[in-house]
Amino acid sequence: MKIAAGAAVAMAVALPALPAAADDAPDERPDVPVGTWLAARTQPAVQLTSFTYTGTVAVPTSTINQPAFNRLVEQATATVASGKISSDERSIAKWLFQQIAADVDTYLASTTPERTVEAEVGGLCTGWWVTPDGYMVTGAHCVQVGETELSRLFAQQALAKFNQQDAKEIISGLRGLEADEEIVKLAQQIYVTFNTNHMQLRNLKQSLSVVQSLPGGGVDKTAKPVPAELVSVGESYPGKDFALLKVNGQQNLPTVPLGDDSDVRTGDTLYISGFPGLVTNTPFFSLESKLEPALTEGPYNAKRTTQTGVPYIQTQAPSYHGNSGGPVFSKDGKVIGMLIAGTVSENGEASESESFVLPVGIIKEKLGEKNIKPAQTTTTTRYNEALNDFFRHYYSDSLPKFREVQALFPNHPYVAKYISDAQQAISAGKDESPKPILLWVLIGAGVVVAAVIVAVLAKVLRRRGRRRRHSEPSFVQPPPGAVQPPSWRQLPAGQAPPPAQEAYGQAAYGQAPYGAAPGHNNHQYRPGPDHANPQYGPGPYGYPAPPHGQAQPPSGEQTRAVRYGQFTPPPNDRPS
């Protein structure tokens, strides 16, 4: 019992020196930049969204209101006579077109035939998964458009051909006058205004979709739009610009966690993820490039409140058209708001210094109204753990977790690339995965067992030594004058002489191996195959030392050759 207790104490002393397991704190950020860590964790949940309106655009044919036009000609003649405009035909034509463009319904009238064209308009935004079964958050203005704005979009898309045809006809009435660029623009503006004012939309239909990759993963040309259902929608900016979508048939989707409004304050760095239109709308980038979200960062400048009492966060994190609806993160990787708007200059360019974020408190409020509870599954948990291993160069440890993610969610857009990169790093000898904790426990236990065996053997030998000292042999003294017996007959009292044949052989007494007793089989102790010559290392942190206060084992051949060295615990490379 004393030996068992001693072994337990020795184990307790040895175990604290063992290296920590790789997953002791799986969610702590590795020693990589915040932006790198954030982008890798959040990109799988950030998706490109689109809204589309289709319908029939109908516009009437236009004709000149002759009486009104005749009065305009008379007015032009008077203006020329007064010297306010030049008398050349070009100057008179420009003046006429300017007057018509300023009041098109006075000088143009609708007539037949009606002209129709099928048209489609839409836009791209950003959304993000909030539940594993397909609920997505985005902005209200990303899923619906007001009537005025919708008419403008259809006019822009569908009426360009009609506007050009009508402009050519009115210019041809100038009787041979060669129109310059200014006259052409004025003529087109007349019909842009008239056709837009008289346009009708019929059979209008709306659709929403989320762009997802196909099985096998990868953000590439295999991605396709998946229909989404509009569950809830608020008021566009400056209101509570929030919308909730549902994509059916989803499971194990990657999600991002929601934080609290109190997680950030003025001066903190914010991170915006989304799809800037300057990339998605340009023809110069591949589809693969367009389907990977961009991450921008900037300081939290101030908290603002609209005239209707809706709170917004002002930040200098750059944002652009298309970023709308994208999640905004704190440095801890939690959503603290959603990018909604930015200021625009007079020429329509976005100002990078003023972006406005709807706080996460409003998002939680709107989700609560529909009883939607943000959640994450093993897909997200394992993926985050694997990323942390990957960034710590624990490539062997990361591989089974990445593969588990791939099995849970085959459509994952990034996990296949990480698996490939981890395998290449292992092949290149870059893997720094720590040994499993069980292996270190077994090694430590082996050291303890060896020390206990040595201690037991030493104790046994000491006891035998004491017995021999207390039982020295005594010889019977012969009577005076008696003949002394031969030296081989001088034996301790009460012992029989050895067999005669042993006088000519090697006596076994004193020949026993270390720790063996006379009369036992003369075999040496040899450690088993699992314990022979254990080597502790060489690992990145040196060799483990024997437990404090424990004697070194004997150095003879009869004991195991255990190599001892100085154990240095792994450096604490985790940021505070």
Image (cartoon, rainbow, N blue to C red):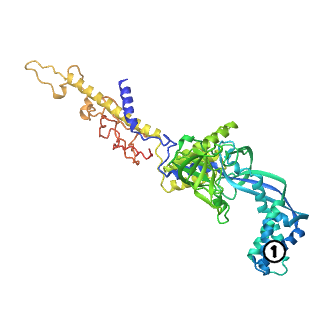
- Given residues 541 and 169, the one toward you in this image is 169
Residue 498 x, y percent position in the rendering: 25, 27
Give the residue pinned by disc 1: 76
Picture coordinates of residue 262, whole percent (x, y): 54, 40
The residue closer to the viewer here, 540 or 336, is 336
x, y percent for residue 263: 53, 42
Q: Residue at x 84, y 77 (%)?
A: 172
**Label 1, residues with CA under 10 Å away: few <14, some 14-19, many ≥20:** many
Taking 224 as reference, is 482 above or below it?
above
Q: Amino acid at mark 1?
A: Ala
Q: Quadrant of the N terminus?
A: top left
Q: Is residue 352 left or right of residue 178?
A: left
Q: Residue furthest top?
A: 479
Q: Residue at x 36, y 43 (%)?
A: 567
Q: Position of residue 110 (x, y in %)?
A: 89, 63
Element type where label 1 sits in the image: helix
Task: Say above or below: 234 vs 163.
Answer: above
Q: Tell which residue pokes out farthest to the front in this image.
A: 82
